[in-house]
């Protein structure tokens, strides 16, 4: 595990974007696992800038996103499909047909989850970007008594609903209660993992990477991955 401490969010975004840009440069048809939330926005802004300047290209890149809210139309500005379009895909030369976000609207969510598992397995993720929740979740794998392996529908915890209310007019009742998320096997099967976190995540990052491996702190499973880089702001 490689932990890189940085001074502030700008440095975190620069470092994380550099790691992703290097991946895209070394393998132009790589598969990126992508994340949403407040944390990666600055990272994506750097990638957009470097793509517009002609330093990197996403022309042959394929992507799989970690998760999506259930029962939120994809046209809703807070859907993760919409987030990805607005914060990255609309501004770089990626072919949107090569970008994938789990289907939060599927009538048969079990089938949607199985299909997403098969997609991830067939693509093979080269680099998975992750944020981390205050409760240690990655994707929407919430603290539990066991790790869930494949893509699945999850009920969001109160801590996550409250953390995400800021995207829904600060009204916790507007946050979707369920989401479809990659599971731990999906995340752990990525060749490389890059987890980023601001100063507000310092405590949970310490717990996840220096505490016991337990499903009660889902990100702690990353201690068992052979190629993890953490870029975090020193609190
Ligand atoms: P945040 O969320 O980047 O909005 O803090 C991260 C996460 O919950 O995984």
Image (spheres, rainbow, N blue to C red):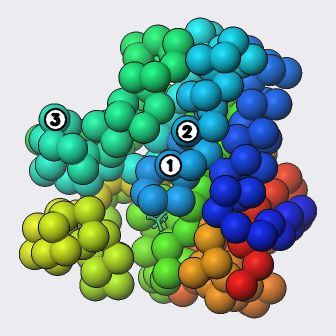
Left-right relation of 168 to 123: left
Query: From the image, which quarter does the C terminus lie in?
Result: bottom right
| Residue sitting at x 35%, y 34% | 86
- Check disc 3 and report the residue beneath it: 75
Disc 1 + disc 3, Cβ < 8 Å: no
Residues at badges 1 and 2 in contact (C-beta under 8 Å)? yes
Q: Is mark 2 within 8 Å of ligand 1?
A: no
Classify 10 Å Cα crowding around label 1: few (below 14), some (14-19), many (20 and above): some
Q: Is residue 58 above or below residue 223?
A: above
Q: Secondary structure at mark 1?
A: helix
Side of 228 where 42 appears, left or right: left
Please identify the quadrant where the N terminus is shown.
bottom right
- CB of mark 2 within 8 Å of CB of mark 3? no
Name the element at disc 2. Answer: helix
Q: Residue at x 85, y 64 (%)?
A: 4
Q: CA distance from mark 1 to mark 2?
A: 6 Å
**Residue ID for mark 1:** 41
Residue 134: image location, x then y, percent: 50, 81
Given residues 65 and 10, the one toward you in this image is 10
Q: How many C-alpha atoms fall within 10 Å of the one at disc 2: few (<14), some, or many (≥20)?
A: some
Residue 18 placement: quadrant = top right
Is 206 drawn above or below residue 62 in the view shown? below
112 or 160: nearer the viewer: 160
State the separation of the CA atoms marked 1 and 3. Answer: 19 Å
Residue at left offset 28%, top offset 37%: 82
From the image, state whether disc 1 or disc 3 is nearer to you: 1
What residue is shown with label 2?
A: 45
Q: Position of residue 201 (x, y in %)?
A: 60, 79
Asked whether, in this view, residue 160 is left or right of residue 200, the answer is left
């Amino acid at each position: 595990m490689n932990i890189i401490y940085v001074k502030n969010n700008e440095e975190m975004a620069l470092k994380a974007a550099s790691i992703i840009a290097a991946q895209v440069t070394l393998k132009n048809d790589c598969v990126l696992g992508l994340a949403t939330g407040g944390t990666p926005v600055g990272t994506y802004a750097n990638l957009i800038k470097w793509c517009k300047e002609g330093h990197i290209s996403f022309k042959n890149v394929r992507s799989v996103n970690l998760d999506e809210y259930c029962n939120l139309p994809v046209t809703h500005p807070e859907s993760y499909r919409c987030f990805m379009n607005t914060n990255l895909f609309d501004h770089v030369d990626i072919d949107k047909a090569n970008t994938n976000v789990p289907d939060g609207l599927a009538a048969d969510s079990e089938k949607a989850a199985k299909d997403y598992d098969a997609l991830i397995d067939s693509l093979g993720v080269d680099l998975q970007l992750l944020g981390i929740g205050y409760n240690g979740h990655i994707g929407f794998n919430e603290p539990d008594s066991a790790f869930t392996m494949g893509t699945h529908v999850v009920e969001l915890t109160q801590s996550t609903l409250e953390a995400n209310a800021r995207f829904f007019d600060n009204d916790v009742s507007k946050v979707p209660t369920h989401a479809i998320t990659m599971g731990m096997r999906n995340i752990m099967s990525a060749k490389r993992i890059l987890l980023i976190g601001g100063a507000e995540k310092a405590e949970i990052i310490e717990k996840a990477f220096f505490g016991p491996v337990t499903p009660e702190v889902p990100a702690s499973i990353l201690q068992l991955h052979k190629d993890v880089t953490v870029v975090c702001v020193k609190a």
